[in-house]
Amino acid sequence: MQAFRFLMLNIGAWIFWFYFIGYLASILPDKFLNKDYVFTHILFFEKNLNWYKRYLLIDKWKDKLPELGGFFKEGFQKRSVANGEIAQLEQFIKETRRAEIAHWLMIAGWIVTTLFNPLWAVIFNIIFAHVVNFPCLIIQRYNRVRLINVLNKKLGSS
């Protein structure tokens, strides 16, 4: 019975943490999302997308992950970008930053688990946090590069 409580405590902590961070990310002001920060800055090798396609094989798996951008009332459903208008592209770029910030903060949830877990469980939670969030981070970064490229082409042709 104690093992069951232990398991439920960890599951409950993660559910609470993901929901809490998701909510906080959903209320970040757009102004905050107008630029990249240390963790969201696109690195030089990411800019042409080949790295994502060649080494991470992103095109084979990215559409298999759920998209929860519209989960909160003010959320942005990323699959809703249809016509590629400049304002929509700019908003979508902001939303990739929002989602990336959320996933970086969700990874930090393992820190909370140090309050009530033995070392082996903390290590498990560190691995869990990364395995669950890294694919989402990769997709956000990939999509942002794609969107920036499309936006730059549109702005160049305007």
Image (tube, grey):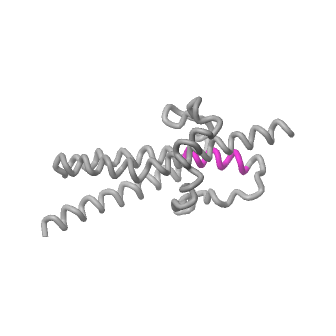
Quadrant containing the C terminus is top right
Q: Is the magenta region chiefly helix, strand or loop?
A: helix
Furthest residue in direction bottom, as rendered: 1
Nearest the viewer among 106 and 27 is 106
| Left or right of 65, for residue 11 | left
The magenta region covers 88-98
Residue 30 rendering spot, x and y as whole percentages: 61, 45
Nearest the viewer among 51 and 34 is 51
Nearest the viewer among 120 and 155 is 120
Quadrant containing the N terminus is bottom left
Furthest residue in direction front, as rendered: 54
In the depicted structure, whether residue 3 falls above or below residue 105: below
In the depicted structure, whether residue 146 falls above or below residue 36: below
Furthest residue in direction top, as rendered: 44
Furthest residue in direction right, as rendered: 158
Q: Is residue 95 magenta?
A: yes
Q: Residue at x 59, y 36 (%)?
A: 46
Residue 132 rendering spot, x and y as whole percentages: 41, 53
Residue 104 rendering spot, x and y as whole percentages: 44, 44
Residue 72 visible, this orientation: no
| Left or right of 33, for residue 2 | left
Residue 85 visible, this orientation: yes
Nearest the viewer among 138 and 71 is 138
Q: Is residue 127 magenta?
A: no
| Left or right of 111, for residue 65 | right
Residue 124 rendering spot, x and y as whole percentages: 26, 51
